[in-house]
Image (spheres, coloured by chain):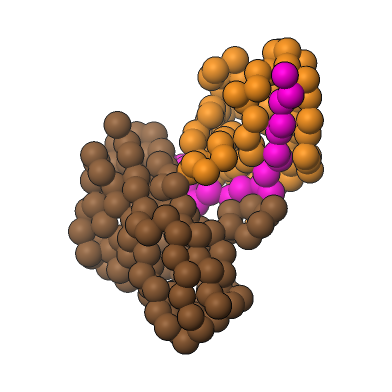
Chain colours: A brown, B orange
Amino acid sequence: GAVVSQHPSWVICKSGTSVKIECRSLDFQATTMFWYRQFPKQSLMLMATSNEGSKATYEQGVEKDKFLINHASLTLSTLTVTSAHPEDSSFYICSARGQKFPYEQYFGPGTRLTVT
Amino acid sequence: GDSVTQMEGPVTLSEEAFLTINCTYTATGYPSLFWYVQYPGEGLQLLLKATKADDKGSNKGFEATYRKETTSFHLEKGSVQVSDSAVYFCALSDPLWEGGSEKLVFGKGTKLTVNP
């Protein structure tokens, strides 16, 4: 149980285009999902907290107009990287929080984005 | 703000060697502490956790004890296997049930390679 999927697992796009990444909780409902960014040989940095039916809460320094987050249902959150640039190339990871104590976070496998 | 510091790798051991990965934290309250593992090509998986001082988390032969006096949560395993080769992340969160935000703060990760 508690499986989280991400799609796509790997994407290459050209500068200036937009890319959408999906995060799904497959066997549980998640009121809250989190989006992280992981640079090579570095830690995961929280980008934003996504709550179903409401606006996402972004961490300081994260451009909300560039990284659009939509959490339209209890099993799906999407991250859209708009007008992508090479510096947006990274590994994006989502997690979904369980609805029962101890509210553990379950992580997706990640999406590798390369912007050329 | 909250932060996690863990020993930098990479760490290379022979099979059946003893493993210690140090982790210390800084937090204003009484956080929950976690160790996550990321196997090659996979997402993060919760390895073990502890929610209060002196708690010992354990799983798959790994152990870590929540030491409030030294603000530490060192990961240990008595005899590592080749299959333990992965990146290990120490993390903390201020849990919801204590009025925290439950956001995870990660250390930078330690890459472990176990040779046969």
- The vertical placement of B24 against A87, above or below, is above
Relative to B59, A67 lies left or right: left
In the image, is residue B107 part of the stretch drawn in magenta?
Answer: yes
Relative to B1, A18 lies left or right: left
The quarter in which the C terminus of chain B is drawn is top right
- The vertical placement of A29 against B63, above or below, is below
**Residue B5, position as x, y percentages in the image:** 74, 45
Relative to A17, A114 lies left or right: right
Relative to A16, B107 lies left or right: right
**Residue B77, position as x, y percentages in the image:** 68, 18
The residue nearer to you, when weighing B94 against A9, is: A9
- The vertical placement of B40 against A115, above or below, is above
Residue at the location (49% across, 36% down)? Answer: B45
Residue at the location (37% across, 59% down)? Answer: A8
Residue A46 shows in this picture? no
Q: Residue furthest left?
A: A73
The residue nearer to you, when weighing B104 against A90, is: A90
Residue B61 shows in this picture? yes
Residue at the location (78% across, 40% down)? Answer: B9
In the image, is residue A15 part of the stretch drawn in magenta?
Answer: no
The residue nearer to you, when weighing B43 against B15, is: B15
The residue nearer to you, when weighing B24 against B7, is: B7
Q: Which residues are magenta?
A: B95-116
The quarter in which the N terminus of chain B is drawn is bottom right
**Residue B17, position as x, y percentages in the image:** 77, 16
